Each structure stands twice: as C-alpha cells, then as structure tokens.
Image (spheres, helix red, strand yellow):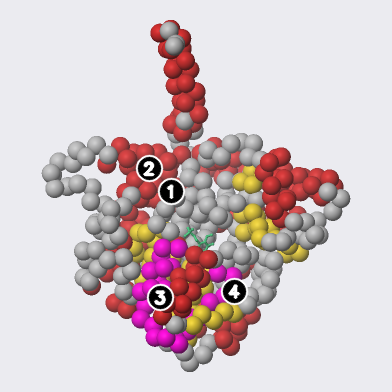
C-alpha cells in the first residue's frame, strides 16, 4: 500500500509525465503565429525552417513519406480541439439543435474548400477520404454488364478495387493501360488511352498523381479526350489537394476525389468528392439516409452518411486557411524544389529515375529504382537506426515525398545515410 505522501508524489509524477508528453503541452510550445511572410523574400530557407516549428514531428526525425499521410500542424490541431470544445458540451441553445452531424449542408466548410479547389459549393461532398469517394463513384454510375472502365496500371487499391468489386458483382469490365516508368511526356499518356478506348468504354478513371511513381498525369487533356468520346472522366486526386494548385473546373472532369489529409496536412479522415453539376443526377447514392433522393440537395446528398465528425471539418478548414496564408504558389514551388533536389542527388548516385523528366509531369514525389538494394531492408535500417522514414515498393523502388516542411538538411541527412548504408552493405 502507498502512504498518502508517496501516493501523491507518484500520481503527481505520473500527471507531470503525462503532461510533458501530451499533445497539449507540445502545442503550447509551438509559436502561436506563423513566420513573417516578408521573411520568405529575404531568406526562404529561414522562412521554411521557422514554419517547420508548427509541426510536431520531432526535430531529429526525417519524414519522407508524406505521400502516405501528412502531419497536421499546430493550427490544424488547435482547430480540431476547439471543435471538440464547442460541440461536446451539448449546450446548444435550441433543444432540437443537437449536433446531428450527418444531416447538414456544412457550407461553412464546403465554401472554403470549394474556393480552394476551384468548383462550386454544391458540387462538393465532404467525405472521409479518396477511397470512400472512389467507391461512391464506382457504385453510383449506371453501368451494364460488359460496360468498360479504363484506368492505368498505377492506380491505388483505394481507386482500383471499387471497380474490381463492381466487376465481380455486376460484370463490368476493367481495362488498363500500362504507364511507362518514367512517363516521358503527356502525348505518350494520351496515345495510350486513345488506343485503349473501345466502343464499350463508359468511364475513364485515373489518378491525377499516381501512388506508384508520383507522375502527374495530363488530367485536363485526358478529361477532354473522354468528353470528346462521350465517356465519363473520374479523376483520383488523392495527392493533389495541397500539393499543387488545383482548379477542378479548369480540368473539366466529371468526378474528382481527394484526401486532403495527405498534402494539405488536414486531419485524418478528411476527404471530398466533386461531382460536376451536369452529371450529379446520373450518380446514385451509395449510403442512403434522409435526402438521398432529393435532387435539390445536389452534391450535399453524398455527404449525408449518418452521424459524422465535425471537429475534423474544423481542422480541414484550418488546413485550407494555413495553405492560403502561406500561399499555394510558394508551397508548390517549395515542393518542386525539394523533389528536384532529392531526385538529382539520387540519380547522381546511380539510381534509375522513374520520375518524369518533364517538370509538368512531376511535383513533390520523386521515385527511383535502386537495385540491388531491397527497399524493405533499407526502410527498416533507415527508421530503426536513424529515425528517417521512407517508403517504396518491391523489390527496389523508393518513393520520396518532399512536403514543404522538410528542410534541405533533412534531405542531406537521408542522402548521407543512404551512402552509409551502401558502404556498410557493400552495395
Ligand atoms: C492515388 C491514390 N488514391 C487513393 C488513395 C487512398 O487514400 P485514402 O487512404 O486517403 O483513401 C491513395 C493513398 O495513397 C492514393 O495515392
């Protein structure tokens, strides 16, 4: 049994420990304002280094896998917590005003998002991620057995499998074009799609930025090709929001999905589905509750999924504000600069580039092939020995993501360790 004094010491110690390690305590140490935008002009590296303080990723960790999932910085986390404070008290004035979160227009969140991605509020539904949005697309369009969907061989499972399910259950056909590694130019991709279209092609589904190599596909041209042939275009833009400037209307697609929890650094479980107003009535709901059959709701009917998570939406809104405050042009410029740097350094080291040589077809993901190195062995070594997180694919592909909060010195540390690994393993 603990006596009172020892009990107090022990519990205070536990509390102190918990506090020290807690997110709240860490957030308190983060500067409450963003760096002066003027600093960017005089010393851009210092500006980014100051901005890095907004992220909780420890100083000694190098995170080169933002492509899988981003890290929400302090302004986003604070907005989520504030969202909980204002909703969890259940003290709304109107007794009927429960936070019935699955049944609202959420225009206060849709408006800034629609402005950020270049479309109308009524064309956007707030969902949890690109996988969910892709599933709505694959399940929602009328297709007969034998109708075809044409995609690339670089789709993410969360993009491809909704169609595979539809194929297995209802007999549609999934066809694929094989993208070269690397893709050299836009014409190559357009020709591949053009040749693969058949009289039964009803949908062209492709990633705006692929998960496999990070190539930025010529989405505008592909959508226009689809339109010219009466084919629906559905674009998986999981990576795009926050990585590069996006204007969905100017792409001219019919449907667009995205996961802002990647490059916009929004809360996990933030996604959206865009449906061009002219095709909204051709897309069935997959999840149905009140409103599913109400055309007046336009895209709002797709976000009616039952009770949902409003604090995450507060975080999404804060992530948009943060990107606007920094400036998407600066963010995209930084993304490209860092990716070009790591790509150049890796190719100097003999890596085979799977990243497009055309700057218009790449952004913040550099992919290289590095045989005979086994990427899993390298990945574990980097993380376990040096706190550097990378990711790739079997057997020897490395996919290096370069979010704006990464420092040049972080990339240099990765490169130095890469050289050390090769020396140690005699490769
Ligand atoms: C192109 C693409 N689509 C879909 C997804 C799935 O994203 P989420 O897990 O956020 O649904 C990813 C994830 O990396 C992706 O790269």
Residue 212 pos. (x, y %)? 61, 65
Residue situated in front as seen by the camera: 356 or 21: 21
Instruction: Say if mark 1 contacts mark 2, CB within 8 Å.
Output: yes
Task: Find residue 348 and report its image quarter.
Answer: bottom right
Q: CA distance from mark 4 to mark 2?
A: 37 Å
Q: Residue at x 30, y 60 (%)?
A: 305
The dot on residue 337 is none
Residues packed near mark 3 inside 10 Å, few (<14), some (14 to 19) or many (20 plus): many
Query: Which dot, 4 or 3, sits closer to the camera?
Result: 4
Which residue bears the numbered disc 1?
267
Q: Secondary structure at mark 2?
A: helix
Point out the tag, 4 or 1, that comes first from the N-terminus: 4
Point out the tag, 4 or 2, that comes first from the N-terminus: 2
Report the magenta residues as a range: 131-155
Q: Quadrant of the N terminus?
A: top left
Q: Secondary structure at mark 1?
A: loop
Point out the tag, 2 or 3, that comes first from the N-terminus: 2
Residue 61 left/right relative to 135: right
The dot on residue 254 is 3
The dot on residue 80 is 2
């Amino acid at each position: 049994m603990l006596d009172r004094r020892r009990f107090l010491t022990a519990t205070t110690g536990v509390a102190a420990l918990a506090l020290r390690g807690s997110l709240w305590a860490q957030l308190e140490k983060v500067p409450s304002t963003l760096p002066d935008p003027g600093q960017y002009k005089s010393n851009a590296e210092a500006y980014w280094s100051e901005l890095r303080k907004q992220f909780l990723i420890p100083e000694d960790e190098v995170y080169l896998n933002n492509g899988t999932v981003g890290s929400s910085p302090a302004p986003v986390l604070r907005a989520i917590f504030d969202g909980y404070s204002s909703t969890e008290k259940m003290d709304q004035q109107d007794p009927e005003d429960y936070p019935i979160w699955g049944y609202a227009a959420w225009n206060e969140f849709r408006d800034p998002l629609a402005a950020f991605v270049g479309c109308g509020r009524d064309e956007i539904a707030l969902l949890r991620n690109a996988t969910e949005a892709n599933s709505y697309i694959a399940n929602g369009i009328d297709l007969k057995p034998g109708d075809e969907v044409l995609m690339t061989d670089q789709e993410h499972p969360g993009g491809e499998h909704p169609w595979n399910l539809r194929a297995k259950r209802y007999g549609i056909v999934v066809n694929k074009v094989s993208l070269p590694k690397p893709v050299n130019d836009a014409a190559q991709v357009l020709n591949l799609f053009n040749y693969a279209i058949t009289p039964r092609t009803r949908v062209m589904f492709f990633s705006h930025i692929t998960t496999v190599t990070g190539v930025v596909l010529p989405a505008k041209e592909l959508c226009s090709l689809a339109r010219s042939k009466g084919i629906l275009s559905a674009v998986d833009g999981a990576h795009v929001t926050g990585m590069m400037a996006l204007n969905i209307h100017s792409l001219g697609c019919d449907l667009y999905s995205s996961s802002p929890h990647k490059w916009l650094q929004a809360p996990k479980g933030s996604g959206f589905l865009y449906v061009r107003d002219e095709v909204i009535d051709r897309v069935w709901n997959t999840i149905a509750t009140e409103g599913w059959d109400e055309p007046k709701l336009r895209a709002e009917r797709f976000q009616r999924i039952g009770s949902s998570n409003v604090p995450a939406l507060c975080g999404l809104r804060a992530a948009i504000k943060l990107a606007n405050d920094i400036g998407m042009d600066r963010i995209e410029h930084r993304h490209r600069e860092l990716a070009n740097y790591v790509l150049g350094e890796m190719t100097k080291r003999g890596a085979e580039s799977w990243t497009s040589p055309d700057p218009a077809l790449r952004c913040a993901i550099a992919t290289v092939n590095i045989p005979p190195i086994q990427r899993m062995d390298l990945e574990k070594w980097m993380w376990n020995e040096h706190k550097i997180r990378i990711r790739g694919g079997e057997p020897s592909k490395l996919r290096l993501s370069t979010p704006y909060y990464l420092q040049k010195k972080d990339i240099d540390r990765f490169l130095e360790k890469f050289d050390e690994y090769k020396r140690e393993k005699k490769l």
